[in-house]
Amino acid sequence: ETEGFAKQACNTPCSRADAVKRDQWYRENWWKAPEYVADWTAGGEQWCAGNMKAKDGEDPCGQAEREKRDTWYRQASDNEWWKEPQYLEDWKWDGQEGTAWTADCRQNANRRGGQEHPCGEAEAAAREQWYMANQEAPRPAKPSKAELTRRDNWYRTQLSDDSKAQRMEWLRERRENEK
C-alpha cells in the first residue's frame, strides 16, 4: 500500500530508503489500518485474514498471529469506551449483572459478553465509581413485573399511525364545522 493508511503518506514525504521501510511495515501491519480495527470492533473476520487481499474469512492467519492481533486491538482501542451512554445505561439498569459495561473490551461489550469476558474486579470498581460520579440522574429502580405488564398493555392500546392520522383529520374537520 504505497499511499499508507487512509492515503496519508503524501502528507509526510520521506527519502527512498524510508519509503522502502514504510512499505515493508505496511505489508506486515496492514491489519492495523482503521478499516480492520473497525472490523475487529464489529466482530468481523477481515482482521484475521492471512493477507489484505483475502475476503470473507478465506485464507485466515494462524492462531498465534490471531492472538497477537487481538491483543494489539484490545490495547490500541479506546480504553474508555465504557463511558459512552449505552454502557452507563447498562450499569444503571442492571448494576453488577450488566452484560455490557462489565466486559473487558468494546468488542465483547457489543456482544453483551461481560459475563463471559469480564474486566478485572479493580477495573469494575473504578468504572462503577466513575458511573456514580457522572450519572445525570440517580439509578432508577428496576420496574416491577406489574409495571412492565401495565406498560405493555398501555402500548398495545395506543392507536396505530393510520388511526392517528384518521383521528387528526376528524378533529380538523370538527374544528372547521364549529366555526
Image: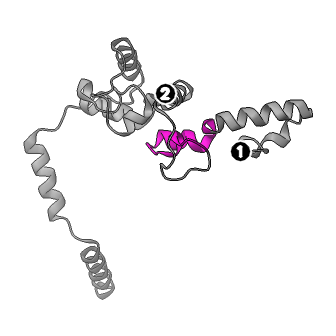
Which one is in front, 174 or 145? Answer: 145
Residue drawn at x 43%, y 28% is: 105
Instruction: Please give the range of residues in magenta.
Output: 31-51
Query: Dot 1 lies on which element?
Result: helix
Q: Could you say which disc has been placed on residue 130 in the image? A: none
Q: What is the chief secondary structure element of the magenta stretch?
A: helix
Q: How would you rate the neighbour count of disc 2 (Cα within 10 Å): few for under 14, some for 14-19, many for 20 or more?
A: few
Q: Quadrant of residue 23?
A: top right
Residue drawn at x 60%, y 38% is: 31
The three-letter code of the residue at mark 1 reads: Ala
As drawn, the residue found furthest toward the left would be: 146
Whether the residues at callouts 1 and 2 have beta carbons within 8 Å, the answer is no
Indicate left or right for 81 with 176 as reference. right
Q: Could you say which disc has been placed on residue 64 in the image? A: 2
Indicate left or right for 45 with 160 as reference. right
Of circles 1 and 2, which is in front?
Answer: 2
As drawn, the residue found furthest toward the top would be: 122
Q: Could you say which disc has been placed on residue 6 in the image? A: 1
Q: In the rendered view, would you say 14 is above or below 151? A: above
The three-letter code of the residue at mark 2 reads: Ala
Q: In the rendered view, would you say 174 is above or below 116? A: below
Which one is in front, 79 or 116? Answer: 116
Residue drawn at x 26%, y 33% is: 93
Tell me if residue 37 is in the magenta stretch: yes
Query: Dot 2 lies on which element?
Result: helix
Tell me if residue 34 is in the magenta stretch: yes
Screen quadrant of the C terminus: bottom left
Indicate left or right for 108 with 57 as reference. left
Residue 14, how many percent across, how many down? 89, 33
